[in-house]
Image (cartoon, helix red, strand yellow):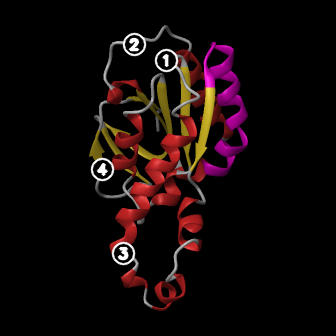
Amino acid sequence: MSNRLSKLLNSFECHISLPWNPNISAEERAIFVVYHKEDELKLRARMPEFEYTATSSGHSWYLLDVTHSFAEWMAGQDYKEAYFEDPEYLESNYGYFAEELAEKLKTEFRDRQDQNSVVALMGCGALFGFASVSALVKEIAREVKGRLVVFFPGEYDENTYRLLDAKDGWGYQATAITVAQ
């Protein structure tokens, strides 16, 4: 419901407007905005509100959308037709996809950001089964000077994040912004 997203936006505003401590680790500078997977389209429609909230608090905003990343990567593969015939051959290339995606994303914001920037990552659900979101976040968080805001469709419980309600999750020292269930 949009009411959940309004509460999430309010929580984001309260957090993003606070003064930032520059002396914390990359993991601690990350912020996970955790939302219900069924709210994906509504969240996307309200993304300009998140941007406005960040910029109104004096932060520049760089949005990285990975929704179509796998499809774009796959389209550039020489053996894509063979992969469609026998998809199991593609699995060994997922690591290459993840590495190339991380490098591509870092080049999009690396030289444009400063310690007051928000680098926002959305579309993480589209990576499910193709790349590890946790590994991607850890890789790009090292390059973010300000705050990395990850829009995360899933669950958060006791420092454990579960993408799309998967059984396995991972621990991460990010700040979680959630709405009570």
Q: Say what secondary structure mark 1 lies in.
A: loop
Q: Say what secondary structure mark 2 lies in.
A: loop
| Residue 128 visible here | yes
When asked about the image quadrant of residue 68, the answer is bottom right
* Amino acid at pointer 4: Gly
Closer to the chain start, of discs 3 and 4, is 3
The residue singled out by tag 1 in the image is 115
Rendered residue at 61%/33% (across/down): 62
Give the spatial CA distance, label 3 vs label 4. 21 Å
Label for residue 143? none
Asked if the residue at tag 1 contacts the one at tag 2, i.e. Cβ–Cβ closer than 8 Å, the answer is: yes
Q: Say what secondary structure mark 3 lies in.
A: helix
Label for residue 169? 4
The residue singled out by tag 2 in the image is 22
Rendered residue at 61%/18% (across/down): 59
Q: Say what secondary structure mark 4 lies in.
A: loop
When asked about the image quadrant of residue 17, the answer is top right
Closer to the chain start, of discs 4 and 2, is 2
* Amino acid at pointer 2: Pro
Residue mark closest to the camera, 3 vs 4: 3
Give the spatial CA distance, label 1 vs label 3. 37 Å
- Which is the main secondary structure of the residues drawn in magenta? helix
Residue 94 spot, x, y in % from top left? 38, 67
Q: Work out which quarter of the rendered image holds the N terminus and state it.
A: top right
The residue singled out by tag 3 in the image is 91
The number of discs equals 4
Give the spatial CA distance, label 3 vs label 2. 39 Å
Asked if the residue at tag 3 contacts the one at tag 1, i.e. Cβ–Cβ closer than 8 Å, the answer is: no
Magenta region includes residue 51: yes
